[in-house]
Amino acid sequence: MSKEEKSLRQRREPGTSRPCIKCKYGVENSTDPSKGACIAMKSADGAIWKKLIKDYYNTTCDRFEEGETHFRDRV
Amino acid sequence: MIICSNCQSFFELPKDADDYAEGKGDCVREEKDEKGKFWLSKSTQENSTCSLFKAKH
Amino acid sequence: MATEAKPLEYKGKVIEFPFENPDESNLPLESLHENLAKPSTGRTKRLKARCRWKHTSAGEFVDDSVRAGIERMRYITESYRESEGRPEVIRRALGLANILEKNTVILQEDEFILGFNAERPNYVPMYPELSPYTVLDYMQGKYAPQPASEAQEIVQYWSKHSLLTHAAPYFTQDEMDRMNQVSTMSAPPFASGFSSMIPPYETVLEDGLLKRIQLAEEHLREAKEKMAAPYWNAGERLELIAKIDVWQAMIIADKAVISWARRHARLCKIVAENFESNPKRQEELLEMAEISHRIPAEPCKGLKDAMQAKWYAFLICHAIERYASGYAQKEDKLLWPYYKASVIDKTSQPMTHGDAVELFEIERLKVSEHGAGKGRLYRETFPGANDLFILAVGGLNRDGSDGCNDCTDAILEAARNIRTTEPSIVFRWSPKGRLKTKRLVFECIRDGLGFPSIKHDAIGTAQMIYFSQFSKNGNGATLEEAHDWCNVLCMSPGLVGRRKTQKTRSEGGNSVFMAKIFEVTLNNGFDWSYSDMQIGPETGDIEDLKTFEDLWEAYRKQYQYCVNMVSSAKDVSRYFEIRYLQMPFVSSIDDGCMELGMDANELSEQPNPWINPITTVVAANSMVAMKKLIYDDKKYTLTQLKNALFNNWEGYEEMRKDFLNAPKFGNDDEYADQIVKRFYEDIISDELRKIYNYSGAPQLPSGQAVGMSIEAGSRVGPTPDGRFGGQACDDGGISPHLGTDKKGPTAVLRSVSQVNAATQKANLLNQRLSQPIMRSKHGFKIWLAYMNTWHDLNIDHVQFNVVSTEEMRAAQKEPEKHQDLIVRVAGYSARFVDLTTYGQETIIRRSEQDYSAEDLEYLGVEL
């Protein structure tokens, strides 16, 4: 596992002040708003490789960064 | 009195309207934003009131 | 500056390619498309300049000012709370009537076509009865409906009554979780509420709603008389109870629609008399008032009537009674009698052809402002679009004569002039189609609109005949009626007309994602790269797939599982739509529903079932690469491949090159094409045809990716075709994967023609053609030869991007200067600047097909 992948390893922290829903790399799940997806991971050519976030409100990781990503930088 | 029937935006329904009812009218307001002018129409009652009231001239 | 195509030696001559319009050599290549719009009047120019687009991308509205309205959900909920205990179909009608009586109606400056779906021009409506998930999603974002507390109460109410609430208990939590991943399967229709339909507009235009009410009243009277007459017969008469409710609901709905149209008429009159000072506009407003007072109550007389009646019917069917995507209609046939009356005979609402073109430009701008309160999935799935709006033109008439007419030309001229992405157009290609109209089709494509997309007329008609044999009431399409079809949404044909049209997406639709299915096939049904969960049956680890046939059969089982699941989800949705989501207005305008007293969700006269396999070519190319490098050549082992994939090819660069360079579909390569053909026919089609849907017919695959080649790609790990994890998959349904078709345009056609089109419901083929050739003096001749060859190869569909990489790169740098740059994404077009960077790159990476001398020879072009 690369350093980047390690930093993106999700961990469930109930009540965290740094939840994925507040993170610039978090996007809402397509169907169930309690879930999300992480868009921080990029493939070799810059394509975004999504990872499911099963509990959008209570999950975080080392790459947490509060904010929003412009639609053009998403999928 | 601040009621719809005294407001510039109130237009009483003609008696032959399908949705005619005693005291019923159309509240028609002109608005403008960066894309241009538009008019909104909503059903109302003559004795209703709202914060956008403008007395008839 | 724009550059000409290089000269080419062909049949012993050097062929030059000067621009058809010599002035083009003075236009900058990087902004060519900013110079092509030619709105036909000052009004349409103004309307376009102030158009309130509601395009979405990556789940967001591109225009930040868009908001979710509360009126629609407020009034339907209010009505439902008051109508408890009454028959469900009546509650649906009363809900519609309450919305139409109390909602805000809108008139905008310069408008001629009246009617909107929400309370302000920058709002979209909400549908809590379909899916509270969707409203919750809006509520937690910046578009939240206000007041939030009221929205919250409404969601709470519908959490007990929605389509999702009714249907979900019939699936296990595991099944729901698997579908909701949208990785191997689409989310169930009952979770998203997504739908599409073909409204039977003909009855609205030809009869008017007063006539429809009269018909319902006659049926009602007869039924009540039959109920009361001696001697009582339970077997015959109890069934009349449900019919009586349906006819009553129709009457409530139609009266409400007439009254709502007349509210618009009153608004125009009030504005003309109290707000407007321009005498010309005053006169026009009074004309609009007169039309909306009379229409859609009465039959249409001229083109203005028909356009307005069609728009009102569209709004109710697609946006107010319930949400349904689409703009399905055979517009040149539907409007031809009114075009003729106004433009040719001048017997009603007389106008010139130019006036008609302006009206079609106005229609396009009206559609461009129409937003959908759809869920996040569908705001991601059609990047750059408001929603999917696709109309059809061309083809053949019922008697086999050419269906192109002057109305077809007006529709195409308007599209070319005004340059909006919406609505997209499908042209049904027949050898009988007149050249004048085909030239206009060419001009739209050449100018980079990405549409019309082209469908093979005879294939579509044969399909209508095929499905009619399964009609449950023996009243499917006749041989004549089979000619009357359009695309239901992007790709799949469905009947148009006064009855037998498709009314719900639970008839045809729902998707499976073939590349992801391939990925989990190599991992015993487990998804390691996105959701970290078991999402398919256990069919063995990669090392268990000792032979190619093992791989083939394991894939078949994973595919079977997915298509079975999404098919059942679709039909379970239908079951509950019939009971809780009746459509009294739609039913009232369908002759079959009217005659039989049945709701439009329930009555199925012409089956039209399909499932959308998406990202098929990545899966098929992966199959080919594994056969070649592992099973045939034995250059690599399954364990090596497993390790390479788990490491996203990192440390396996040489191996990746081999897999990337393995034979690929789209190059007229016998090795690849035969495997791919078998994949489409033996697995995709044959397995699907074992499943019979609600309407009693076997399903067919309809390959169309919408924007899911991008979105789904981001959820798919690395694949054996040499693709990295997260990279986009193949666009379309049978398009070669990005940049892998390297042998020219005719090689693509030969590969695609290997797959028997009759085994598929539709298959989308994207091609990107050389802009300098298309804009040259030979452009039309070469394209026409290409199209005739395509037709003769019996291919279902093709559509084109004609845009330079230079212009797309320039637009990435300065998006604000490239608002008119349009690209074809899938079954729809989008403004390039409304796409994500990821999405933009997928367009740029498509192979730009140039023509070699061999290609021209194959096409039989004389230059």
Image (cartoon, coloured by chain):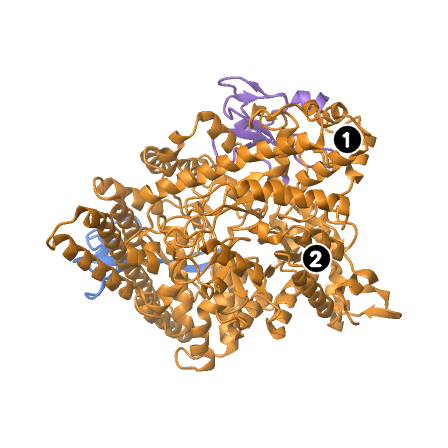
Badge 2 density bin: few <14, some 14–19, many ≥20, Cα 10 Å = many
> Where, by quadrant of the figure, is residue C260 drawn?
bottom left
Residue C429 on image: x %, y % = 60, 65
Residue C202 on image: x %, y % = 39, 65
Kind of residue indicated by mark 2: Val
Q: Residue furthest right?
A: C12
Viewer can see residue C41: no
Residue C741 on image: x %, y % = 75, 49
C-alpha distance separating marks 2 and 1: 39 Å
Colour of chain A in the rendered structure image: purple
Viewer can see residue C436: yes
Colour of chain C in the rendered structure image: orange
Q: Is residue C481 above or below residue B33?
A: below
Which chain is indicated by disc 2? C
Residue at the disc numbered 2: C803
Image-based side of B53 in relation to C499, left or right = left
Residue at the disc numbered 1: C630
Callout in the foreground (2, 1): 1
> Where, by quadrant of the figure, is residue C802 drawn?
bottom right
Which chain is indicated by disc 1? C
**In percent of the image, x 40 and y 62: which residue is there?**
C201
Q: Give the quarter of the figure containing the N terminus of chain C.
A: bottom right
Kind of residue indicated by mark 1: Ile
Q: Are dots 2 and 1 on a single chain?
A: yes
- Residues marked 2 and 1 touching at CB (< 8 Å): no
Colour of chain B in the rendered structure image: blue
